[in-house]
Image (cartoon, coloured by chain):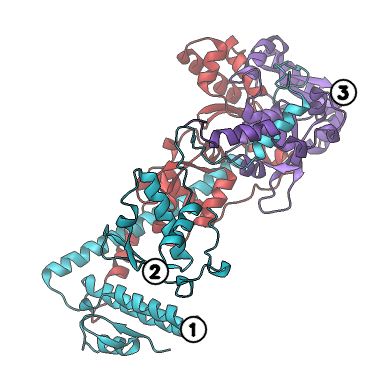
Chain colours: A cyan, B purple, C red
């Protein structure tokens, strides 16, 4: 599998890209690595099976590219201008501080080990309240019977309830999604491209519109319609695609029952 | 007068002990003859009295034990009751129920079921003698396994665990189900 | 010198206690002001030393505890037949140190410092009860934040976190610092 990438400054096989970059014929700054990854993922997806050798080769190439690019982004020792050198030292200072902090925690771990060992030389009193006293702390189980214990067990092991939404205040529309689906199946075939707005313009409540929308999505999921939206928040164009179903109403063409 | 070496070793052992310690074991541990152990014990008992310690060392069947001063029992009682309401919280009861039905069970297993840390509750139940450690699980960390005690059965008036109601009987009754249904159904007329 | 009334009541309570007893609880039980409780505790701690008792009274994890004299550990080990309590690995200790000094801290923050995945270590420390989740960070993903627990203090024999050595004292010496600096500097000619 030859992976080809397409970027603003380069189009071609991936390994050739690496060669061009390492021989300074291409400026790595100008190549968005995200595009390269997406191109590869696209190839993977279209080729179906996972090609492990291509995948590992890609990872190696990309790792090299990432390293090269990050080196270019962080001022390195090879091309030094005063500002860049200073910046480089700042980066190293941060790294040094982190290393020192790590060593300090390592030393703290050693201190902890000593403290823990010292503490372990002493055994805490654990006998508790003398059995002879039989202090009568109020019997916590007073008034509790076996049935209550069983109830408690059920409570404890019951699947934790999902938050309950009380729907008592909601006026449920008479039309269900399943009914809306059958309504659309009756009207859409032969109607050509229908805009969602025109389809729902006569409806009074938002809930009714939503029910139609869910019905359209359901039909789309089942492959009976295609949806097309020009732009974000643009109107939705619905086209019936079931050529066989254009005239027929046979049971085999009827969309699956909506189970939602 | 400060304690002698032998007396303070015995006191240390009694501090760590949960059960009475037999004089024979003390002879073995201190590697001194029985009569010297006896002397050291006498010294220790006397010292606690003279020093007006908060505890006493007593000879009881089976050996020596360190226990709280009898005249301070009222404080111990109050201590035993602090911060504990006189009834089991529902959290504690649920934990106890899990131990009853799933025993032997580890703290981590209870916590996984209840979804919260149960250390405090388990300690309370153990202190009250309703549950007790019965061993360790084989898995990583070898967690302590807990089971209910005879005291638990007694309090519930049960003879044996098998008398606990089977939990399958506890599925919600029909009235609960229809109540749930009602809440999902729109009110008539709306 | 015999114990004062307050000191012996506290000693009695510690004899019956199974975990550190907070001074606040003692104030409540003895019905005396906090400073008098403090005095009585000091008296008790001193008395155990002077009398060469077999136990010591220590301030630990914010409370008071009665425990065996550390120098008698060999007898206690033989008595309790306890091996060395399981040691923590250096990775676990270092992670514990990061949590102790930087708490509350997320797993990702610990991992960034240690430079490796720390999920397993964090889970182990949480299982042992040395660290516990204390909340969530505000940032993206709202990672769980961890802090050390009282069990951690008890394991280390500390009364409070402030007793840990300041992290500045643990920084490596100047020669180590310059060595590290050298390793970060690019080799000449590169």
Query: For the residue carrying disc 3, how many other residues have a C-alpha within 10 Å: few (<14), some (14-19), or many (20+)?
Result: few
Q: Return the residue at label 2.
A: A190
Where, quadrant-wise, is the N terminus of chain C in this rendering?
top right
In the displayed structure, B178 sits above or below C91; it is: above
- In the image, which is nearer the foreground, mark 2 or mark 1? 2
Q: CA distance from mark 2 to mark 1?
A: 45 Å
Q: CA distance from mark 2 to mark 3?
A: 100 Å
Q: Nearer the viewer, residue A100 or C150?
A: C150
Residue C159 placement (x, y as % from top left): 49, 32
Q: Return the residue at label 1.
A: A51
Can see residue C12? no
Q: Is residue B21 rendered to the left or right of residue A94?
A: right
Residue C102 placement (x, y as % from top left): 39, 45
Marking on residue A215:
none
Q: Return the residue at label 3.
A: B61
Residue depicted at 35% across the width and 60% down the height: A99
In the displayed structure, A23 sits above or below B143; it is: below
Q: Is residue B140 rendered to the left or right of residue A147?
A: left
């Amino acid at each position: 599998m030859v992976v080809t990438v397409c970027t603003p400054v380069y189009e071609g096989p991936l390994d050739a890209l690496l060669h061009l970059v390492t021989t300074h014929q291409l400026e790595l700054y100008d190549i968005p690595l995200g595009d390269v990854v997406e191109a590869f993922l696209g190839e993977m997806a279209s080729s179906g099976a996972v090609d492990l050798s291509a995948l590992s080769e890609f990872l190696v190439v990309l790792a090299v590219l990432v390293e090269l690019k990050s080196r270019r982004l962080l001022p390195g020792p090879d091309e030094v201008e005063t500002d860049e050198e200073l910046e480089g030292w700042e980066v190293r200072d941060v790294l040094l501080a982190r290393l020192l902090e790590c060593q300090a925690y390592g030393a703290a771990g050693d201190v902890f080990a000593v403290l823990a060992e010292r503490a372990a030389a002493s055994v805490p009193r654990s006998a508790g309240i003398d059995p002879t006293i039989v202090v009568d702390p109020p019997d916590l189980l007073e008034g509790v019977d076996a049935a209550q214990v069983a109830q408690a067990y059920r409570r404890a092991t019951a699947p934790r309830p999902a938050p309950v939404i009380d729907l008592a205040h909601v006026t449920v529309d008479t039309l269900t999604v399943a009914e809306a689906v059958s309504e659309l199946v009756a009207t859409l075939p032969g109607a050509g491209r229908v805009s969602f707005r025109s389809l729902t313009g006569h409806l009074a409540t938002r809930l009714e519109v939503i029910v139609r929308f869910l019905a359209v999505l359901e039909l789309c999921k089942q492959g009976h319609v295609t949806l097309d939206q020009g732009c974000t928040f643009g109107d939705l164009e619905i086209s019936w695609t079931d050529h066989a179903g254009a005239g027929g109403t046979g049971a085999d063409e009827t969309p699956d029952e909506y189970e939602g | 007068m400060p304690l002698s070496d032998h007396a303070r070793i015995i006191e240390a052992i009694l501090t760590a002990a949960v059960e009475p310690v037999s004089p024979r074991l003390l002879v073995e541990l201190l590697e001194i003859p029985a009569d010297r152990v006896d002397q050291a014990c006498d010294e220790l008992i006397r010292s606690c009295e003279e020093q007006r310690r908060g505890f006493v060392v007593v000879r009881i069947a089976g050996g020596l034990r360190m226990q709280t001063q009898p005249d301070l029992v009222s404080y111990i009682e109050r201590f035993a009751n602090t911060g504990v309401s006189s009834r089991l919280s529902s959290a504690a009861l649920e934990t106890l129920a899990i131990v009853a039905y799933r025993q032997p069970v580890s703290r981590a297993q209870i916590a996984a079921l209840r979804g919260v840390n149960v250390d405090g509750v388990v300690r309370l139940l153990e202190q009250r003698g309703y549950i007790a450690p019965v061993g360790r699980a084989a898995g990583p960390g070898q967690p302590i396994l807990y089971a209910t005690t005879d005291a638990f059965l007694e309090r519930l008036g049960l003879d044996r665990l098998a008398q606990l109601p089977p939990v399958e009987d506890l599925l919600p009754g029909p009235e609960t189900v229809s109540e749930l249904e009602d809440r999902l159904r729109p009110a008539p007329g709306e």
